[in-house]
């Protein structure tokens, strides 16, 4: 099977969930005798451009320098290039690529796309951006042979909204244990002395709600916030202006071992992401053994298997504050969640399982 992967920034460039997916799944697929993978990369992101890494073939396609259009221009050119190449399957990520799914089909290729989350509902996309994502996501159900969703809840949404069924293949995570908790001393942190938020400071992650509720609580623990935004932003500035000695802002943490220790040693991890399907950050929290307090959505309920692997909160004022004050004095229950967290990954979210599902999906697609 000759498979082209389009729509990410490329390989081995890891920036978001798309690139992590490409890395984890493609590195495993190419070890199989009957699979050949080519990943299309943003040429401007790679100073060195080898033709192949770890058995994965690479194509570098140029694009324009534009925050809103660079991915679309890159994808369009990649779809054209792939259509004139000898691939059996063209597989895309990102529902913004809906308008391009018909192009490879004109040349006899099988096509599929992972449509990811409900992008048009995210506050970062307003007006035309939100309308485009909705239109493009609907178009995915028409222009591609098959669509993939990463959760049953998202599959149900596509059935209801677009009257189209999809194949469910989740995202994955790698299990890890704590190795060096002493490195947290740079922030004067000790194991289980703090709650943790990891993610960009954008409205759909609801960091403002979490911070508001935490500082109004009586908790004597700290709240560690890992993340920022790479631009001037009033929402992020408002969060960072909070004046409370319990709140610690680390900014971006690029050292993955250091980030892992922040997960491993937190008292509990707050998950506020609202509009995705299977969320990579919460999977990482499970894989790293965190007790999780998550915003209540169909997606978090699915990932945490109801009440088996976490507690839930709403955005209603006072709701999370009450939960914080409840669990602050209930370490026994949180310890049970920590002990069972990795089991949830083993059950449903290992990259080996995800890779097997994609392999079978591609074989079926060719038939």
Image (tube, grey):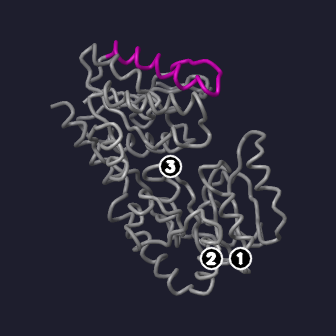
**Do labels 3 and 1 touch, CB within 8 Å?**
no
Please tell me which residue is depicted at 50% across the width and 84% down the height of the picture: 333
User: Quick one: SS at disc 3?
Assistant: loop
Name the residue beneath numbered marker 2.
324
Q: Position of residue 27 (x, y in %)?
A: 39, 42
| Point 33% across, 15% down: residue | 85
Q: Where 333 falls versus 195 (above or below)? A: below
- Quote the CA–CA distance across marks 1 and 2: 7 Å
Residue 290 placement (x, y as % from top left)? 53, 70
Q: Quadrant of residue 331?
A: bottom right
SS of the residue under disc 2: helix
Is the residue under label 2 in contact with that under label 1 (CB below 8 Å)?
Answer: yes
As measured in the structure, the alpha-carbon distance from the residue carrying label 2 to the one carrying label 3 is 23 Å
Q: Quadrant of the N terminus?
A: top left
Q: Which mark is residue 217?
A: 1
- Which residue is under mark 3? 275
What crowding class fits label 3: few (fewer than 14 Cα within 10 Å), some (14-19), or many (20 or more)? Answer: many
Q: Earlier in the sequence, mark 1 or mark 2?
A: 1
Element type at mark 1 = loop
- Residue 208, x across and y down, in percent: 69, 58
Q: Is residue 79 magenta?
A: yes
């Amino acid at each position: 099977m000759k498979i082209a992967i389009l729509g990410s920034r490329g390989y081995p460039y890891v920036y978001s969930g798309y690139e992590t997916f490409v890395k984890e799944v493609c590195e495993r697929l190419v070890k199989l005798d009957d699979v050949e993978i080519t990943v299309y990369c943003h040429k401007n992101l790679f100073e060195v451009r080898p033709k192949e890494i770890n058995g994965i073939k690479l194509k570098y396609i140029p694009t324009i320098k534009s925050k809103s259009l660079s991915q679309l221009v890159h994808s369009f050119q990649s779809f054209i290039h792939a259509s004139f190449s000898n691939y059996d399957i063209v597989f895309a990520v990102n529902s913004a690529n809906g308008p391009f799914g018909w192009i490879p089909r004109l040349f006899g290729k099988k096509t599929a796309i992972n449509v990811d989350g409900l992008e048009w509902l995210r506050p970062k996309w307003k007006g035309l951006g939100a309308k485009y994502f909705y239109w493009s996501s609907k178009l995915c159900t028409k222009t591609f042979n098959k669509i993939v969703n990463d959760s049953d809840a998202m599959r149900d949404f596509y059935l209801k909204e677009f009257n189209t069924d999809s194949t469910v293949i989740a995202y994955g995570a790698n299990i890890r244990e704590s190795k060096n908790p002493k490195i947290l001393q740079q922030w004067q942190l000790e194991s289980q002395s703090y709650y943790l938020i990891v993610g960009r400071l954008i409205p759909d992650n609801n960091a403002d709600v979490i911070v508001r509720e935490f500082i109004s609580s009586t908790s004597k623990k700290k709240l560690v916030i890992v993340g920022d935004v790479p631009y001037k932003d009033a929402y992020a500035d408002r969060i960072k202006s909070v004046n409370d000695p319990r709140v610690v802002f680390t900014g971006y943490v690029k050292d993955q071992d250091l980030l892992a220790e922040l997960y491993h040693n937190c008292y509990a991890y707050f998950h506020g992401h609202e509009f995705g399907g299977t969320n990579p950050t919460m999977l990482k929290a499970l894989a790293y053994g965190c007790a999780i307090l998550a915003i209540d959505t169909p997606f978090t309920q699915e990932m945490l298997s109801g009440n088996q692997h976490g507690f839930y909160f709403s955005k209603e004022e006072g709701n999370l504050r009450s939960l914080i004050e409840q669990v602050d004095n209930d370490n026994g229950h949180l310890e049970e969640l920590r002990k069972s967290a990795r089991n949830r990954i083993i059950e449903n979210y290992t990259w080996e399982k995800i890779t097997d599902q994609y392999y079978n999906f591609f074989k079926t697609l060719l038939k």
